[in-house]
Image (tube, rainbow, N blue to C red):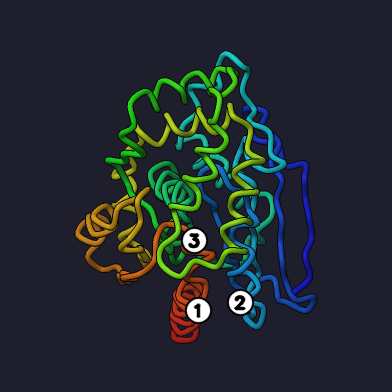
């Protein structure tokens, strides 16, 4: 697949999004598009192992750096950054769909961690898209509500300071590096762990802190009604310390038509540590989409 980079897509509130697409040169405009939303404190490159695994598929792939992450700007004044929310990311996803996905292309959405919440936020904000333009969704290592990111004393206070532009306390960066390593399950590839650490280390402290607060209060259950209109897959790691598997099981209860895959030795960083499983889930959604189109 040929990669194309677009770094000037502007949201209504002024965020500039860095968007990236992959497609075979002869791909038809009505071929399906897979849109990938990444998680908190990493960037679109966290999906690259899955993109590479799907290189043989007749599909257009779109990924972007969530606002404030990677090369995307946050689009808010310094005094407003602490108020950023998952709702912002849902609206950004709508902007990405309108900006780069051909009108004739059916869409499969996939979101990891905060990216899964982004998909659910879009479902609440634009239910008209689901069952029409959006045909399927894959929710990976995510939750709709009830997120608890850590119980360490003072952690939330430190994150509030970071969201306001204050430096992390001494040793803060080291603790973050250790945290990233702990997000992987058993048999983690050391190279993948280092890649994840590098992405997190490159995330601005203001973004890190602001979205920490956003995740603690997010509630995307209002998006379930729209998700009931499309095929849904859920993938979770049983050893996930950030989005415990119980939250994924709650998604399964709320969306009983969804397929559910629980990986007993995997943690949170599933695009890296369970690449083949995630890619196979995407293939199944694409195959189902094509079968439905063939009989329509």
Q: Of the residues under marks 2 and 3, which one precedes in the sequence?
A: 2
Q: Residue 70 appears in which quarter of the rendering?
A: top right
Q: Quadrant of the C terminus?
A: bottom left
From the viewer's side, name the closer residue of 234 and 195: 195
Q: Residues within 10 Å of mark 2 (few under 14, many from 20)?
A: some
1 vs 175, left or right, is: right
Q: Tag 3's secondary structure?
A: strand
103 vs 9, left or right, is: left
Q: Residues within 10 Å of mark 3 (few under 14, many from 20)?
A: many
Q: CA distance from mark 2 to mark 3?
A: 13 Å
Residue 160: x and y in percent read 46, 21
Q: CA distance from mark 2 to mark 1?
A: 8 Å
Which residue is at a point 61% across and 68% down the rendered structure image? 49
Q: Residues within 10 Å of mark 1 (few under 14, many from 20)?
A: some
Q: Of the residues under marks 1 and 3, which one precedes in the sequence?
A: 3
Circle on res. 110: 3
From the viewer's side, name the closer residue of 59 and 81: 81
132 vs 58, left or right, is: left
Circle on res. 54: 2
Q: Which residue is mark 1?
A: 283
Q: Of the residues under marks 2 and 1, which one precedes in the sequence?
A: 2
Residue 89: x and y in percent read 52, 40
Which residue is at a point 35% across and 33% down the rendered structure image? 216
Task: Tell me whether the residue at label 2 lies in contact with that at label 1, contact meaning CB atoms closer than 8 angstroms.
Answer: yes
């Amino acid at each position: 697949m040929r990669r194309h980079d677009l770094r000037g897509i502007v949201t209504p509130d002024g965020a500039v999004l860095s968007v990236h697409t992959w497609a075979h040169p002869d791909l038809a405009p009505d071929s399906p598009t897979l849109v990938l939303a990444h998680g908190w404190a990493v960037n679109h490159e966290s999906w690259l192992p899955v993109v590479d695994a799907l290189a043989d598929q007749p599909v257009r792939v779109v990924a972007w750096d969530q606002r404030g992450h990677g090369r995307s700007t946050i689009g808010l004044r310094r005094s407003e950054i602490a108020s950023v929310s998952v709702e912002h990311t849902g609206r950004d996803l709508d902007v990405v769909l309108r900006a780069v996905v051909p009108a004739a292309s059916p869409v499969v959405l996939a979101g990891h961690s905060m990216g899964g919440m982004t998909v659910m936020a879009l479902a609440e904000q634009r239910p008209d898209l689901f069952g029409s333009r959006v045909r399927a969704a894959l929710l990976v290592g995510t939750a709709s509500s009830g997120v608890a990111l850590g119980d360490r004393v003072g952690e939330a206070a430190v994150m509030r300071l970071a969201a306001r532009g204050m430096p992390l306390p001494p040793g803060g960066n080291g603790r973050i590096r250790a945290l990233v390593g702990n997000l992987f399950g058993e048999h983690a590839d050391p190279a993948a762990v280092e890649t994840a650490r590098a992405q997190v280390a490159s995330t601005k402290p203001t973004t890190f802190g602001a979205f920490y607060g956003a995740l603690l209060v997010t509630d995307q259950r209002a998006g379930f009604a729209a998700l009931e209109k499309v095929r849904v897959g859920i993938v979770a790691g049983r050893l996930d310390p950030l989005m415990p598997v119980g939250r994924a099981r709650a998604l399964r209860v709320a969306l009983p038509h969804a397929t559910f895959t629980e990986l007993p030795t995997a943690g949170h960083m599933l695009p890296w540590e369970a690449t083949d499983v995630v890619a196979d889930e995407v293939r199944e959604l694409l195959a189902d989409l094509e079968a439905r189109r063939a009989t329509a």
